[in-house]
Structure formats: C-alpha cells, structure tokens
Amino acid sequence: MYDHKYLLEFTTNVFMGVGCSRDDAAAVAAVLVAAELRDHSSHGMIRVREYYELWKSGRVNVTPDVRVVHETPSTAVIDGDRCFGMVAGVRSMRLAIEKAAATGTGWVATRNSNHFGIAGYYAMMALEHDMAGITVTNANPLVVPTFSVSRYLGTNPLAVAVPAMEEPPFVADFATTPIARGKLAVSEKKGEKVPLGYVQDAEGNPSDDPGILRRGGGMVTLGGDRVHGSHKGYCMTAVIDIFSALFSGANFGPFVPPSVAYLPVPENQPGKGTGHFFGAMRIDAFRPANEFREAMDQWIRTFRNAKPAKGEVRVMIPGDPEREAEERNLRSGISIVPAVVEDLKAIAGELGLSF
Amino acid sequence: MYDHKYLLEFTTNVFMGVGCSRDDAAAVAAVLVAAELRDHSSHGMIRVREYYELWKSGRVNVTPDVRVVHETPSTAVIDGDRCFGMVAGVRSMRLAIEKAAATGTGWVATRNSNHFGIAGYYAMMALEHDMAGITVTNANPLVVPTFSVSRYLGTNPLAVAVPAMEEPPFVADFATTPIARGKLAVSEKKGEKVPLGYVQDAEGNPSDDPGILRRGGGMVTLGGDRVHGSHKGYCMTAVIDIFSALFSGANFGPFVPPSVAYLPVPENQPGKGTGHFFGAMRIDAFRPANEFREAMDQWIRTFRNAKPAKGEVRVMIPGDPEREAEERNLRSGISIVPAVVEDLKAIAGELGLSF
C-alpha cells in the first residue's frame, strides 16, 4: 500500500524530470492521484507510463504556452499548446470560475490538449467557490454511432458537481458508454466473455468477445442497441464531442489523437489536439446560496432514502462510491498492481529517481 | 390528414377560448403542432385535451404574470406563475438568447411552470441567432434510480441544437430513459409484452409487462440495468432534475406535479410547479461563426458517411428523422388518430368552436 502523499511527490518528480515546471508537474500528479483515491485506478498511476511514453514520442510539450485565444464576458477558448491535459484542464477550469464570479457563469472550450485524467476533478474545483462545475472531454475513437461499424466516437465522459450544505456534494462522473474500455482489457486477460451489450463485431453484430476491438469491432453507446435506446447514448456522446471539439477548434470524433504513443496520430486532422469543455455556475446567480444548498441537502436525503429494490441494501447518490473510496484510501493507503509498480520503477530508474 | 396551419389556428382558438392571450395561445399551439410535424405525436395534439383538463382543474393560470425573479449578466430565474409550460418556455429561451447576445452565453432556470411539450422546440429557437441552444425539463416521477423501486425521477429529456453552414442543424432531443412512456401504453393496448430493459416490477425485478406501472412498477433509466450502465442513465436523469428544479426553485423528483388532471398533486411540495432550464451560446463567443459552421458541416458529413452495420442502410445525424418527417408532414398533412379527433371535437363543442 502506498500513501497518497508519497505518490503525489513521486509523480510530481517524474513530470519535473521530463521537463515540466513544478506547478505543471504537480497538476498532473494531483489529478492522477485523485483518480487512485477515488478508486478510478484506470485513470491513475497506470497512466504515468503512458504519459511518459507520449512525451518521449514528442507528442507532448512540457514547456507549453497555454493561452487564451478568444473570449467574451462569459466564455473563452484556451489553446493548450500540446500540454499534458491536466495543465490545460486546471487552467481552463480556473478561468471558467473567474468568469462565473464576474458574470454568473463561465464556459471555457479547450483545444490542443491531451488526455486530462478524470473529468470529475475539474468539475469539483467549482465546489469551493459556491459554484456548480461541469466538465466534458472527447477521447480516442473506439465507439460506434447507432447503425454503424465506424469507430467515430470516444467514451466521452460527463462530470457534474453540485454543492450541498451539510450533505457531501453531488458528483456525477461517467463515461457515456455502458462500460469503460479498461473493463474489456481485464476480462480479456482473464479469458472471460463479456455480457452482450458492451461491444459489437466488425459487421455490427452483438459480441461477447472482449478482444473484438482488435478485430474491427467497436464499443456501443449507452443503451446498448437501438431497441434499448443506443441512439440516445449516441446523441449524448455526439453532443460531448461537439462541445469538446467544435467550440474549441480541437479534433472531433475519428480524428482525436490517441492518448497512447503506440497508436499513430490520424492523418489530415481538421483541428488541434484533444478538446475539452468546462463550465462553472455560481449557485447564487440563480438563488440565494444557502437556500440552494439546503434544497440540495433535501434532494440528496430524499434520494438516499429511496426504497431499495429486493436484494439491494441502499440507493446511492452520484459521488457516494468515490467519496467512500477516498476516505478509505486516505486512511489505509493505495494499492497498485505489480505491473504498474514495475513500470514506475523503470521510469524512476531512467530519470534518476527511486520508487 | 390535417394541414398544419389548420391545426395551428384551431389550437390557438382553443387556448384563447380558455382565456389565454393570443400570443400565449399561439405559443402553446406552435409547440404542439411542431411536435406533430416532427412525428412526436405523443407530445402533439393528444395533449390538447390533457391541457384543457388541467386548466379545468384549476392547475393552470391562463392570465399569468410570468416574471424574472433574479438575474445576473448571464443568468436569470423566471417564475411562470402556473402558466402553460410553453408560455414560460418561449419567454425563458428568449431571455437566454438576449443574455447570450450580451455576454456570450445565457442561462435561464424556470419554476412554477407546467408541461412544455417537446424540449427541442426551445433549443432550436437559438439557431436563427447563430447560437447553440440547450433545454432540459423535469417531469412526472415514473422512473427509478438504480437499485431502487421508488419512482423518484421523470423521463427528463435533454435537447441540444447546434447550427451548421450548408448542412441542416444538429438537433438531439431525447428522453433519458430507454423508451418514452407512450410506447408502454401502445404495447399494453395491443396486448403485447415489451422487451426486458424498459420496466421493472414493484420489487425491482425485470419485467416485460407494459402495464406494470399501474402495479407499483417503474421505468428504468437509460442503460437498463447496472451491468449495462443504468447508473449512468440515473446520473443523467438526476442532473437534469437538479438543473430544472434546484436552480429555479421548482419541485424536484418525486414532487413534480403530474401533467394530467386525473393524478393528484403531491402533498408538501418543496418547490413551485414544474422546472425547466434553458441555455443559449453564441457560437462566435468561441470561434468565428463561419469557421464554426463549416466545422459543423464537416462533423455532420463525416458521421453521415460512417459505414453502416450489416443490414443497415445509413447512419443518421441527430435531428435527421424529425426533419424528414417535418418535410413530409408539411407536404402531405398530419394524420391524427380517431380518439384524439373525438377529443378535439368535444372540446370544440364546449368552447363553441368547430373541428
């Protein structure tokens, strides 16, 4: 088990080791370790090597000029200059919060960025400012539109954080596909089939083969198939792609650059890098802040006290599982799988650090 | 077959007949007829009788003082004074558009309203102003959170409209459940079962009985079950409930008043009426408008040219089916089922009109 502070320090040193400023390296480390604490280890320390390889391949600029290229009182576009996604992410969300403080809401579209970790990290930055936060991003194309076999969409996540009074905040943070890609890899390694409704084969037939993505298959959108509303999941994923790429001038859908160095960047890209979109809304731009917070307490308590289905123990509020994981992992430390530990040791060796 | 202009005029006369101003009656009629044109007849003329009965029961104010109760440069809260939802909806979206013109984006939360028809109507109002539009609303509680049997959520729709250049606009407009409630009623009348993944019974077991809602059952969220991501659908539906009710001070989840007169209003309501949320975003608050529109053309053409799955003919863009229906229905007229025609004739008789 690793203490989160140790992981923060180590990860900061890794990214300073490749040339990032202390602030930028600390931002990357903070988001990766937050993912570990919240039990989203698919977005945690496993990414250190991926980011390191991406830097080695020349696809990340560790001394970027992250800048505002356009703005109005409530909006801005930020160009990340090929930075690590966290650097652009934190900068963009801060600007959204500043604009919200001035005009009620702030909305920042970000281009020329890279993988930014868990979307929820940025949405939650709004909470301490008495604001609700919203974050979306597009991602590597692995997902098919309804009726198609073309992998034109990412697992594009949406995160929304809303503050309450005595209750912990509402934090929804989810990919807009039935499952995360990481789950497919785990099932494949175990030699297991997956339930129908996660992936399809190269012709578009339902498949239970977790390795089908390497044979022309694709992930399906939330809903699974047309009968169960996959076209609604397609709409959601498409909306997130448009917000992330079209408002910012980043690459959309099939042109989003892979977040791993071993996959090539698509040719003839219409935009710049990966795109994100950030929003901050002052709650007192709508109602007195305390009134809003008390109403959120009532919402949360009402739903937490909903009657469980037979065999279920409780009804959860979005954010409950992650918050409980964080409390546990802060106390007892973070476990990291051996293969990732080996990667971290190897990188440490290359950079003259130790892990 | 009925000409849409005839339906517009008739419906306007009905709502003037119950006491609405010409403008307000025309707003109700415009949204209902737009639903018919777009083949969303579940939100079309069938609602005339429901709205009429709701007015008779005293739950709608036909001479409302719809007013802004709070605002900042980019936000406002509107109180609908128990108006027909379209009256508050059109007023709210207009204000969002005004605010976007001034500060880049405009966001209006609306309370004390009623059923407002198709969400897409309002989102699309932004298009002619070179803006993207967003609309959500909460609705009668019929939907269960994941792991629960409590019907605490509506089929809460999300609509997003984004302008293009030569291509028609992208218009997503969908309820955040696998199917609309109307489909259950149709299957029940036909004596058919429904696929698993639409509804559950009073204990939370999967059910294929379309009448199960009358026996304590509930509709499930998009995703269907936990294995297929119903918790993500729950997150979405919950986010829409919070945006519609918490930002405005309307009723949330289980307290949302039914849109039909034969179901009672819940006791001890924490808020006012039904809630909606509207957003307008100037596209040139992010990029030069023509650049944005051309990029949207490219997005739309890319996805329209995605490879169809085996047995499928084409890949659609959100908004394609409704636009094609509208072109067809404008040309050849709107067909209305006999039971609805009878309702309209009866109402016409009561109001001294003819249908």
Image (cartoon, coloured by chain):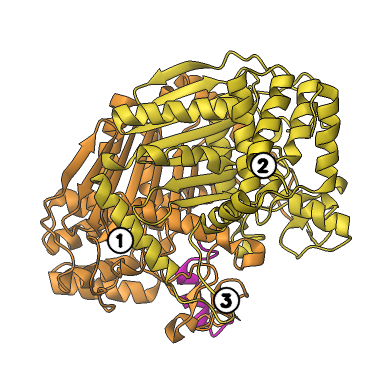
Chain colours: A orange, B yellow
> Does B309 sit above or below residue A331?
below
**Label 1 chain ID:** A
Measured as percent of width and height from the top left, residue A7 is found at 29, 58
CA distance separating discs 1 and 3: 34 Å
Secondary element at tag 1: loop
Q: Residues within 10 Å of mark 2 (few under 14, many from 20)?
A: many
Q: Nearer the viewer, residue A62 or B315?
A: B315
Measured as percent of width and height from the top left, residue B36 is found at 66, 46
CA distance separating discs 2 and 1: 34 Å
Labelled pair 2, 1 in contact (Cβ < 8 Å): no
Q: Nearer the viewer, residue B310 or B344?
A: B344
Magenta residues, start to end: A177-194
Task: Give me the disc on residue A115.
Answer: 1
Q: Decide if residue A245 is in sight here.
A: no
**Label 2 chain ID:** B
Residue that carries the numbered disc 2 in the rendered image: B154
B304 relative position to A26: left or right: right
Secondary element at tag 3: loop
Q: Residue at x 37, y 21 (%)?
A: B72
- Which of the 4 quarters of the picture holds residue A304? top right
Measured as percent of width and height from the top left, residue B340 is found at 81, 42
Is residue B209 a member of the stretch shown in magenta? no
Q: Type of residue at label 2?
A: Gly
